[in-house]
Amino acid sequence: MAIVLGDGQYGKAEVRLLRVNRGASRESTSGENTSDDEIRDLNVTVTLRGDFGACYTEGDNSVVLTTDAQKNTVFAFADHYGVSEIEEFALRLARHFVTATESTRVARVRIEQYPWDRVAGHSFARSGSYVRTTTVTCSDASEWVVSGLTGLTLLNTTGSEFRAFLRDEYTTLAETSDRILATDVVARWRYQGAPGSWAGGESWDLAFEGIREQLVTAFAETYSYSLQHTLFAMGRAALEKHPEVAEIRLTLPNKHHFEQGSHDVYFAADRPYGLIEGTVTHDDAAPAGQAW
Amino acid sequence: MAIVLGDGQYGKAEVRLLRVNRGASRESTSGENTSDDEIRDLNVTVTLRGDFGACYTEGDNSVVLTTDAQKNTVFAFADHYGVSEIEEFALRLARHFVTATESTRVARVRIEQYPWDRVAGHSFARSGSYVRTTTVTCSDASEWVVSGLTGLTLLNTTGSEFRAFLRDEYTTLAETSDRILATDVVARWRYQGAPGSWAGGESWDLAFEGIREQLVTAFAETYSYSLQHTLFAMGRAALEKHPEVAEIRLTLPNKHHFEQGSHDVYFAADRPYGLIEGTVTHDDAAPAGQAW
Amino acid sequence: MAIVLGDGQYGKAEVRLLRVNRGASRESTSGENTSDDEIRDLNVTVTLRGDFGACYTEGDNSVVLTTDAQKNTVFAFADHYGVSEIEEFALRLARHFVTATESTRVARVRIEQYPWDRVAGHSFARSGSYVRTTTVTCSDASEWVVSGLTGLTLLNTTGSEFRAFLRDEYTTLAETSDRILATDVVARWRYQGAPGSWAGGESWDLAFEGIREQLVTAFAETYSYSLQHTLFAMGRAALEKHPEVAEIRLTLPNKHHFEQGSHDVYFAADRPYGLIEGTVTHDDAAPAGQAW
Amino acid sequence: MAIVLGDGQYGKAEVRLLRVNRGASRESTSGENTSDDEIRDLNVTVTLRGDFGACYTEGDNSVVLTTDAQKNTVFAFADHYGVSEIEEFALRLARHFVTATESTRVARVRIEQYPWDRVAGHSFARSGSYVRTTTVTCSDASEWVVSGLTGLTLLNTTGSEFRAFLRDEYTTLAETSDRILATDVVARWRYQGAPGSWAGGESWDLAFEGIREQLVTAFAETYSYSLQHTLFAMGRAALEKHPEVAEIRLTLPNKHHFEQGSHDVYFAADRPYGLIEGTVTHDDAAPAGQAW
């Protein structure tokens, strides 16, 4: 009954990085549209797993790539290679970390990207409508890409009922044939393969936009018998249009809106809230491995 | 040297209210555009000042309108009168409270409105790009409207320098002729009069949109010598186009972005941050009274 | 390549419950010490897994115990049975839910408990020094208890070095033989069996207090070669004194404090931060099953 | 009707500073109690007002002490002079800034101090029970000290009623003769003079501890007819024992706890909440000047 080290991992969390992709105007004097800058506003987290036991148990740091160096690498790669699609950037970083030191067996890079809207050629306003995410995991032999979004808040003013549910002795909820349905979408989907291998030859960016659109549209267009029912419709819609997605996991809080004596006036409650989670998958999807 | 009660106020804070303004489709079968629903998503805070001393010092509640009743009033008014412009809704509530009880001398209603984008006829996605605010104050004799916004995050990738500043023994900052300029705008402006009395005959909504546009445009188009310099340009632009605004107060954190060995890669720092505040005013603006 | 439902679960999150355990004074007139009230301030989350597929895919709610009823059950059980140790309360709830409906196969109840300090017999001040947690999972056949804490912030002013680490081309960090070590402890440990079966016959409360004490003491007394090294020392200390713990998982952010030209003055940085995670386990611990 | 600059101010916000006051052990080998370290964990905000108009309107930075230099000064002073009582440290900084540049007329330094409990000689656990605050304002001619606390959460399980309140058409609240009373105390009090001039010759630290104790005790011991009533009792208790306090301002949210069918089980609601504010003052207190 010895006491031993089990699973572990370590890394640098929340490296807040802004990458400016300068337009041509700095080099030219043309002043054309192509001179617009673009920005990538990221929050990057690196996590390493491997043969780090001696560090934990013996205080032997000789196998430890410092988290400070990991941070430096994120900034250096953003400079050397630029940042375009976050999946590509995360892959580049994760592949580097898994080969950079002997001790690292698996490297995971998680990125949150905050979208901005262009106001003028070099000016931007942050869009708070959602955050795009990716989690890339690389071992020596394999790599996995799970992308998604958080903070997408959706609401239907009608087209949602909740009836004919099971009743036990603690059930007091009234049935409703027309309620507000509102949620903050957290979605994560696992890709099979990479853009080059996909039927449509899409890019990571196009896939993201397409899947986001499917989720929003399915939420809006599904006549809802429950938030669970809407969840499945959203996931199915995404998979139908995007065969490159093996599975999608959705976490949907039920943001309750309680009628205040009128069908048009609601109290938007904070807590408690229903929390609905579910996975929609192709039945022949490849195993997830270490993707999640 | 007696111990006495000084200024005080009380009320109900953060009543989270959703008002659905139903389109015609519920009553008709036409299915036209006019059938779209609209929503108002509000956070309402009521504050009362007046002759409430006996409650504090004697425990005499006979002069106290309960905060629960204040909350009920917010929901009831949203039902009876609907919610269109938040300034109008706040005025209606504040006027009610200042007359509802003898003890209330001044009523203030503060509203935050969360904007949503339409996805489909009855479906919406919350836009996180800013929060619209108003603070309305009514006494028996006067009323004041201060509107504004928070959470508007802006960034310029160029067109900002910071040089030729004062140097003391603790100054180590290098001058820069080209830096990232980024801030989270908090703006509040005091109106003179109400829409009917304005030259342009505008509505509260149009005034808000116009001022917001001026702030964004001035931020984008001003070649900046400092964030203070940009602040004044933003305020001036708003007042130039909107004579109905007596004064505008801006609070602009300087969201520092530090170069990481490259002019294109930045670390977006959290704390500390510069904090720049300023007022831009018409020199003949009417006194502010109890507006703020 | 059909699209099908995968894993899912649903429930009610963050039921904020205060339970007052009244002292005797209400029934007696003695006014003795035993008349003191006690309080339990909880945040309860219920999650159910089972045969709910028809709800997701068909909109069939007949198998769904509403999350509203789950909330009602939490309050009703707090009344009927009282709340003493959170593990017991969570077990009672989870056992109920797993048997209450045919469709539920596994019920999980997670509780956060906010500690309060007594100020006087019926008066309390909330202690913000940590939050106690438990996650209890029950199936028809088995049950698992994982308890822990969050928000415990610890700091050593000396006794911490970080040297002799691996260096790659991106490593610029200087070695240090005396630094600030600070972290926010998140700990979760899995119990084997229940209090009655433990060697020491301890209660859940005593076990919690003992383990917390071990974590704090080991943090303070370990001369640290790295936060990983301190993590293992903390976990080992807990397991050595508490054989009822099968394994403990620790998540320790490295709250960086950067010297400001002096060994006594530090900038406490927000982001990025190191993030160190690890498990310490008995090598013959029973399998974890669905505990986590 | 020219557009002009009105009031403004600028500075550096939220400088997160840890100061270690090393015990003797580093210099001696005795290992006595005196060898314990002490820490001061601060969040410092500097704000300057003065003749900065040219910076805003002309982009003239020659009058601007950079916020970066302000930050450097905070760290340098912490090193040169140490940090003991936050009021003293804030006074030292504010006096410096008001004299450091010609343009500064008024300097304000606001500090939040996070308390820690000692675990061992060089080890600490952060206490989350409250945050101590001070706001010091210095002009050439005068200085003001306003100290306080935030985040002190108090709760009484009995001894609180709310009855005989005014009823209007929107009032539906039931009277209660025994309810939970809970609040998060925000208190700020203005001192007259400085420790040397006080009757009791107290220090800033002793005054703070005494006032905090009075607030807590008065909350616990007052039979409450309303939160307003409790507020006044708290303020009066503080002023009675501490004549060095000219006035105290209290902001007390009413953290509603709603009975769940039992007098012992409550739902702790988030929003909305009552918000009670009030000032208790000596009737002959010196004018507040620019203290607030």
Image (cartoon, coloured by chain):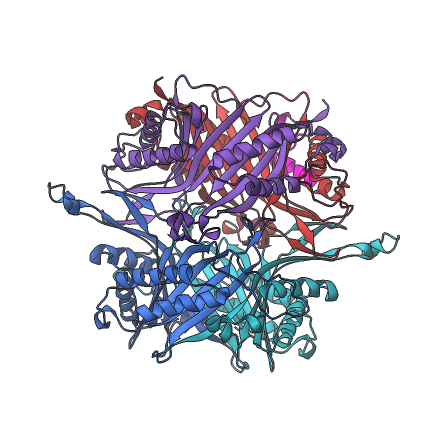
Chain colours: A blue, B purple, C cyan, D red
Residue D207, how many percent across, how many down?
64, 35
Residue B66, how many percent across, how many down?
68, 39
Q: Is A90 left or right of D232, judged from the image as shown? A: left
Residue A125, how many percent across, how many down?
32, 44
Q: Is C154 left or right of B226, judged from the image as shown? A: right
Locate residue D217: give its quadrant.
top right
* Camera-side residue of D238 and B115: B115
User: Which residue is the extreme one toward the right?
Assistant: C29
Q: Is residue A66 visible?
A: no
* Quadrant of the snapshot with the N terminus of chain B: top right
Residue C248, how many percent across, how many down?
53, 71
Task: Please name the residue shown 20% across and 48% down the image.
Answer: A22
**Can you say whether D77 is above or below B121 in the image?**
above
**Can you say whether D34 is above or below D146 in the image?**
below
* Camera-side residue of C69 and B282: C69
Residue D208 among those drawn in magenta: yes
**Can you say whether A192 is above or below D139 in the image?**
below
Q: What stretch is highlighted in magenta?
A: D190-215
* Camera-side residue of B120 and B126: B120
Q: Is residue D289 visible?
A: yes
User: Which residue is the extreme one toward the front?
Assistant: B29
Locate residue B207: give its quadrant.
top left
Task: Please name the residue shown 54% across and 63% down the image.
Answer: A162
Residue D279 among those drawn in magenta: no
Task: Please name the residue shown 53% across and 81% down the image.
Answer: C287
Q: Is A128 left or right of D253, judged from the image as shown? A: left
